[in-house]
Amino acid sequence: MCGRYALGVNLNELPQQFIQSAITPFSGRQSNYHLDQEHSTGDNYTFNAGDKESGDSLEVEVNRANGDFTKTYNIAPTKTAVIIYGRKEEGKTKYIIETSTFGLLPVWAGKNNEDTAGKSATELKKVISHLESRYFNCRKESLTSSRVWNSAKKTRCVVPIQGYFEWMKTKGKKTPYYVYPKDSSLLFLAGFYSHNSNFKNQESDDSDNISSFTIVTGPAHKADVGDISWLHDRKPIILMAGSESFHKWLDPDVEWSDDIYNCLETSKNEAYSNIASYTVDQEVGNTKSEGEHLIEKRETKPKKSISDFFAPETKVKREEENKSSSHKGTKRRKSFSPDEGHEYKTKVKKE
């Protein structure tokens, strides 16, 4: 499951990081793209990247029509984040880095006038927020049966993240963990996006549509590469940057098929071999909390408290007291109270 994650990278830094980590030829040769800003129009600006050795070139467009994005370490559903998808222009794939809302607002939402008629702007925002908070994760298994995701299959994207949070539940307690790549690179999660224009007249901005997205999740098993099942029985699906699956997923010309579905493989996916985790502070549970300290490792050793001064007596000390009391004509008998954990009580019986 992925309901909270971090991306400590500003929007203007993402084009270079995306190209360096993700745009790699299938041959395995490391590309040496040089990135230049070509032009800027309103909320969009385009980068032209070229590799002098191979002659390859590509374009990366940054779209801020749905708001700006600055690095944040606690992205929750309905918050602004970033997606990357492909768009064909003049026979070539242009990569769009776009600000978007975490939580899918399906393209069919709001088409029925009854959904929007007579509702105030505040009421409509509640409708939008409800849908976005409902569809922030898409189960891989549901793609073959649920009609909810049929329209989304045509609009595939990746979601760049620095790492994500997961909570381990043990004996009624929830401990937050931060899951991250060991080599400090970005992770790219499989996702679907939507451009919904049915609510545009109700929005305060001038954008043509509302951009939103969902993250695809799959089952987590002990036998998987990079086992994470000990933490949760589900996991976000990572696409190996630069892999054939990565490029297929982002190719807008490739229609949905079993081949595309197979890009979501989880058990033998080597992208998980680069995963590590550690516990973090409980503060991350508050969606309003923010700051790089949220992804800092928390010391798992419990701190001493005043209760430590009233800890049970040691076995040696009790034996010494028993010997001492035997000379005073008393006999000490130990008894254990199961309601008191491992605390022992001593009862004195007169002989």
Image: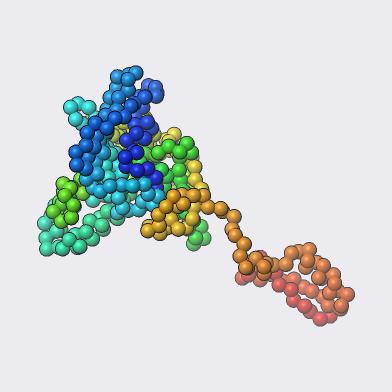
Residue 225 visible (yes or no): no
Q: Is residue 220 above or below residue 172?
A: above
Is residue 230 left or right of 306 when viewed as pictured?
Answer: left
Tell me the residue at 88%/75% (across/down): 327
For residue 19, which quarter of the picture?
top left
Q: Observer-nearest residue: 28 or 315?
A: 28
Quarter of the image that includes the C terminus: bottom right
Question: x, y percentage for residue 287?
Answer: 38, 57
**Extreme bottom residue here?**
350
Question: x, y percentage for residue 30?
Answer: 39, 24
Tell me the residue at 46%/52% (across/down): 293
Tell me the residue at 78%/66% (across/down): 317
Is residue 318 left or right of 196 when viewed as pictured?
Answer: right
Q: Observer-nearest residue: 72 or 257?
A: 72
Is residue 153 left or right of 312 when viewed as pictured?
Answer: left
Q: Observer-nearest residue: 293 or 231?
A: 293
Residue 13 visible (yes or no): yes
